Amino acid sequence: MSRFKCYGVSKGRGVGIFGTWKECQEMVKDFPGARFRGFYSRADAESWLSREGEREKAGYCRHADGYAGPSRK
């Protein structure tokens, strides 16, 4: 199994692309609702982070009842 080359964090103490799991973990550990993923290429991480930003702008969120879609305000 290959190791991830980098990690993307879209919601945490810091947002961005991190080169090690340790750096990523510092941003997401014990952070409520943290969103992060491991990637085999930096380009894939950048693409995901960009899509996550668009998702956030559109007001999408996941609710406790399982609903995932535009925020219900």
Image: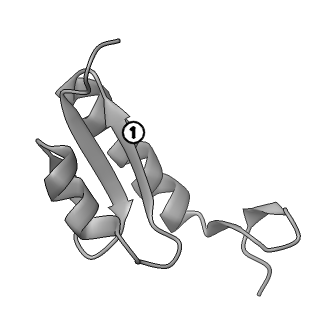
Front-most of 8 and 24? Answer: 24
Q: Which residue is mark 1?
A: 48
Q: How many marks?
A: 1
Secondary structure, mark 1, is: helix
Residue 10 image position (x, y, % from top left): 37, 59
Left or right, 58 with respect to 14, comes to right
Residue 12 sits in which quadrant?
A: bottom left
Find residue 30 and report its horizontal and vertical position in percent: 40, 77
> Residue at 73% of width from left, 66% of height from top?
70
Residue farthest toward the top in the current orientation of the protein: 1
Q: Decide which of 38, 43 is in the foreground and name it.
A: 38
Q: Residue furthest front?
A: 1
Residue closest to the eye, 68 or 72 = 68
| 65 relative position to 11: left or right | right
Query: 1 above or below 54?
Result: above
Q: From this viewpoint, is residue 15 visible?
A: no
Quadrant where the image shows the N terminus: top left
* Relative side of 68 to 48, left or right: right
Q: Amino acid at mark 1?
A: Trp
